[in-house]
Image (spheres, rainbow, N blue to C red):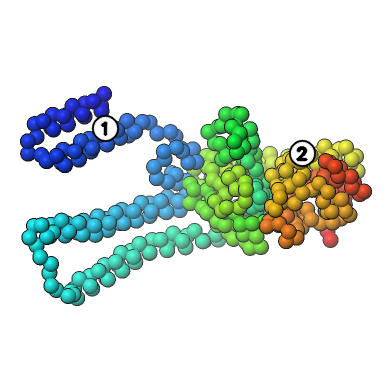
Amino acid sequence: MELLTVLRKFKFLWVVGDNMTYAKRFKALMFGLAVSAALPALARPQPEITGRPVEHQFGMQPPATGLADYIYSLHNWMMVVCLIIFLGVFGVMFYSVFKHRKSLGHKPATFHESTTVEIAWTVIPFLIVIGMALPATHAVVQMKDTSNPDLTIKVTGMQWKWGYDYLKGEGEGISFLSSLSTPRSAVGEPGVAPTTPRTENYLLEVDNPVVVPVNKKVRLVLTANDVIHSWTIPAFAVKQDAIPGYVRDTWFRAEQTGTFRGNCVELCGKEHAFMPIVVQVLSSADYSAWVDTQKKKMAALAEDPNKVWTIDELKTRGQQVYSTNCVACHQASGQGVPNAFAALVGSPVVLGPKADQINVLLNGKHSGKYPSAMPAWKQLSDTDIASVITFTRNNWTNKAQENIVQPAEVLAARGK
């Protein structure tokens, strides 16, 4: 109905407006159509943003930290400055072109230079750059100030998950891996449609989110096991690369509770798109309760390294560990990915002395045969490492002579 009304109005103008040229009528009609088409979009209610990107979002995510708010305000201010410069420069240029065109009888000037103009177009841009650089420098200095944190967390990037170790502050000693929790049936395969519906947080949900207290300075110490990754939460204005062999750090102080989402933004391999980050910000009381719960879980999972497991017990547990941590690279079939990741079926390491395979899982290995190194998996428990090694040595067509590894052997190898 809105479109029909606009068309009737412009039909009247087309007939009655004797003094309008055809070009002006056409331009007016196009403008009216554009405005009428935009009205429903402007009236459409916007979805609530929950610390993640949303469809048809205009601008950046709402900031959740003071520094993010400063950076976003600085971004908007610089956009205004750039817009004013754009309108001023192009406005003068187009005005000069159309107002002084040859068809109106104007002739080109014969002057060669103007010292005043040259000084002006040198000094004014310089002052503009200085005016923009000062607040930007202030933001960068604040981003790099990781001193006096309330909580320090080590973040380790690996293909294709994140490892978190709470080093200092409340929660010290907590450690876990965080992996994509979106089921593969919702993702599908090339040429194969997904079989389960996708949720609101498709590809932005994990099994173990990072949990931090509100209004506390959290320092992140980042590194990587294999290739370069990048830890990013847009609502915190945090983006820091995690580089193998190097330690980088950044920080944030969330000023509101909620769940905030991001992902790895450094191309890190074939499943780069499946490496999300989720941070839950809790009140101080809720965070303390979470810490207590996690420590009780860790105590319950603590196992006697001297316990002797049966081969069937190790294989059953090892299959779970393999499905969670190893299947992305080595595949469920154990065949790996040609020219990318080593096969475990028939592997000399898997079929050889078990001490060599224990060493690979604890310390990683880069043979040079494949682009990516095998990362170290020290963050796994002794029982998990022993069980997954036992699983690979007795699964598929593998029949290793040394076919069982006990947690005590892994513990002894850690101490070497």
Q: Secondary structure at mark 2?
A: helix
Q: Quadrant of residue 290?
A: top right
Q: Secondary structure at mark 1?
A: helix
Q: Nearer the viewer, residue 348 or 179?
A: 348
Spatial separation of the CA atoms under disc 2 and disc 1: 57 Å
The residue that mark 2 highlights is 320
Q: Residue at x 13, y 72 (%)?
A: 110
Query: How many C-alpha atoms fall within 10 Å of the one at disc 1: few (<14), some, or many (≥20)?
Result: some
Report whether residue 287 is seen: yes
Q: Which part of the image, by quadrant, shows the C terminus? A: bottom right
Residue, disc 1: 36
The kind of residue tagged 1 is Ser
Q: Position of residue 232 (x, y in %)?
A: 54, 50
Q: Count neighbours of disc 2 (C-alpha within 10 A) and say few if under 14, some if 14 to 19, many if 20 or more.
A: some
Q: Tell me: residue 297, above or below residue 341.
A: above
The picture places residue 409, in percent across and down from the top left corner, at 87, 52
Q: Residue furthest toward the top?
A: 1
Dot 2 or dot 1: first in sequence order is 1
